[in-house]
Every structure is written in structure tokens, then in C-alpha cells.
Amino acid sequence: MRGNGATATDVPVEQVREQILQVLMAWGMAQDLAHVTAGLMARTDLLGIDSHGISMLPAYEEKWRAGSLRLEARARIVRDGGASALIDGMGGLGYPVAAQAMHLAVDKALEHGVGAVSVCNSHHFGAAGIYARIAVERGAVGLVASSANGVIMVPTRGAMPMLGTNPIAFGAPAAYNEPFLLDMATTTVAANKVKVYDFLDKPLPPGWAVDGQGGAVTDAAAAMQFIFEHPEGGLTPLGGTGAMSSHKGYGLAMMAQILGGTLSGSAFAARRAPTRRPGEPDDVGHFFLALNPDAFRAAGSFESDMDDMIDAMHDTPPANPGEPVLVAGEPEAAERARRLRQGIPIPATLAQRLRGICERAGTPYLLGAPDFQ
């Protein structure tokens, strides 16, 4: 057990993966698609991204029971232009189609030097960085962008939310260092991170969320209401305020919307919301770009130069000797190593909700406290 504002139980990743798998299959997801999804969700938790792993099951259950999430759906390729493709997610959960799309983009990059795949008619796909990792593990540079179903970002100078968190991820392989892996929401913080703070009963840092008058909201439960229930208020663009250059986060969110949504022909949630009928899929769009470094320069030279650049960052004199300079992806790699030893923390509040999901699905609850040696 570990205290983090609320009691948490550390659970081995294998149990977390199996719990997700059992629930998804009980809901009607095909075994092969459920294995892909459970593996990606558990890997997300293993990296310390608690906001996008098993904690997403309550939200998925709500959509599944409402009829807007078609777990039995199988994606299909509807356009294939050599170095590019479009895949229809058929209203299913985003993990299987996103993994398929990133692998297809890498296949195309290995053949053509570059591969670009768009996905339409999808749903939430978890953490964008998981798919950039797929590219990196196959030796490619990967870029991921996505639209979102929720309308929760208040644009700079705005009073009402108009965009989602619209994530962007980028990965580049190195030879001996951890790969560079940037995974970011274009809001100051992801909505699901606010959810985790609510689970843990922790106050939010000022600047993450605002009310209808632009005032800071630091109570996590109140912020959840502004994000998901009230028409006004929501999350700020990256930067927080205009004085802190929130226009940059706003612009990045628009970029992710254009690449993830507009390019694939997926819905713009702010326009679709007033006419959306109950049970209609979210129609989220994703974008996956892969680049083969060997198509641009001598084999292995890109990775060598990546190591040199990362080493230079590590050699930067730290402002605090106890906090060395890191690059994107290294904190997650360290957390992965720790959680492989100690397990994935499941807060008590989340555990209670997961127990309820298991009861309703008719599956056993597998996340009891293990005996770590």
C-alpha cells in the first residue's frame, strides 16, 4: 500500500492487463482486439500515465452502455495510396485501429521513406505516446495527433470551451539512450489527469482549469464539473493564460484538430455536439506519421546523432544538483522500471469503481493486494 492523498494498492502489471482483458471481453469485444487494447492500456499504466490506463474503464463502460461505443467493430482500410492510407474505425474503441494505423504507417515508411495514415470514426485511443513508441521500437520517427470528443478547452480570449485536449506525441529512436518520446495534451493538463486528482482528493495547481469568468478552479471535483457538466469554463490551453502565451497551446490544439480530425473527415466536436443523436459514435479522428531515418541519411547515423544530442542535454549543468536534466520519455522509462518491480498503484476510490464494473460485467475482480517480496 502507498499513500498518495488516498490509499493505493500496488498490483502487478499482468493482473492489470488481465483485468482489463476480462472486462472488455465480457462487454463483447473480440479476443484479439481485447488483447491489443488491454496490452496498450496496461502498458500506459506501467509508464506512470495513470490518467489513461485502467482508470478509463468507467468512461468506456458509460459509452458502451449508452450504445455509442461499438466494441464488436472491426476497422477497415477505405483508401490506400501507397505512402498514405485512411482507415475507418467503424465506431469502435480507438486502441486496435490506432495500433493498426501506426504499424501501417511504419510499413509504408520502410518502403517509401514516409508513411501517413489517418483514422476516422474512432473513439478514445488512450495515451498518444503509446503509438509513437510503436514507431520508435521499429526504428522509425513517429508523429501522432488526434481530435477529441469532449469540448473542454477554452480558447485564448474565449469564455466557452471549443476544443478538446487534442494530444500530440512525437518519438525518435536513439542507439544507446532511451528514445526521445514526447507525449502531451495541448491543454495545460489532460482532463483525465484532473480525474486522477479527483480520485486522490488532491487540489489542482492554479491555472489548470477555469470557471465561466476565467477564474482559477483548484478543487478537483469542481473542476470536473466545469470540464464535463457545465457549458461554461473548462481547461486552459497550454500556457494557462494569455500573459503566459496560451495562444501557443491554442494553436497546437488547432493543429492537432486539423491533422487528426479535418484531414480524416472526422467530426469537429464543437459543431457536432448540438445535433448529435443519442447512441451515435464519437467519430474521433487520429493521424499517424512515420519517417524512416535511413531514407534520409546513412543507416545508423540518425540514432548516433540522437545519442549525441541527448548526451549534451544530460551534460547540461542542473539548476538543482539533485535534479539532473532529462529529456522527454526518461521519466516514464524510470517509472516503468519501478512499477515492474513494485506494481501499478490502484487508488482505493478507483478500485471501488472497478469492483462495480466487474460485478456488472460478471467477471472476477483481480486487483486484490499482492504479496510483493
Image (spheres, rainbow, N blue to C red):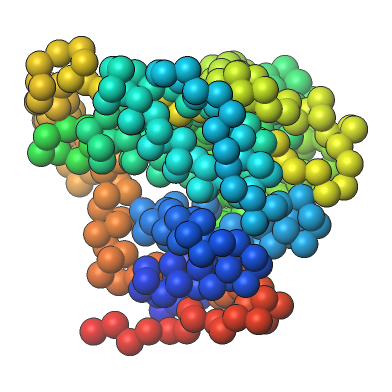
Marks counted in the figure total 0
Out of 173 and 160, give the one closest to the viewer: 173
Q: Residue 321 placed where, x, y %?
A: 17, 41
Write down the quadrant of residue 144 in the picture: top left
Compared with residue 267, is residue 26 higher up or lower down, i.e. above or below? below
Residue depicted at 42% across the width and 59% down the height? 39
Compared with residue 334, is residue 271 higher up or lower down, i.e. above or below? above
Taking the image as shown, residue 317 lies to the left or right of residue 35, namely: left
Residue 215 in view in this figure: no
Residue 273 in view in this figure: yes
Name the quadrant of the C terminus.
Answer: bottom left
Compared with residue 285, is residue 33 higher up or lower down, i.e. above or below? below
Outermost top residue: 296
Out of 74 and 228, give the one closest to the viewer: 74
Out of 1 and 268, give the one closest to the viewer: 268
Taking the image as shown, residue 181 lies to the left or right of residue 131, namely: left
Write down the quadrant of residue 115 in the picture: top left
Q: Residue 105 placed where, x, y %?
A: 39, 29
Compared with residue 307, is residue 17 higher up or lower down, i.e. above or below? below
Residue depicted at 67% across the width and 76% down the height? 361
Q: Residue 254 placed where, x, y %?
A: 61, 19
Write down the quadrant of residue 91 in the picture: top right
Name the quadrant of the N terminus.
Answer: bottom left
Q: Residue 132 placed where, x, y %?
A: 37, 36
Residue depicted at 30% across the width and 17% down the height? 112
Taking the image as shown, residue 373 lies to the left or right of residue 274, namely: left
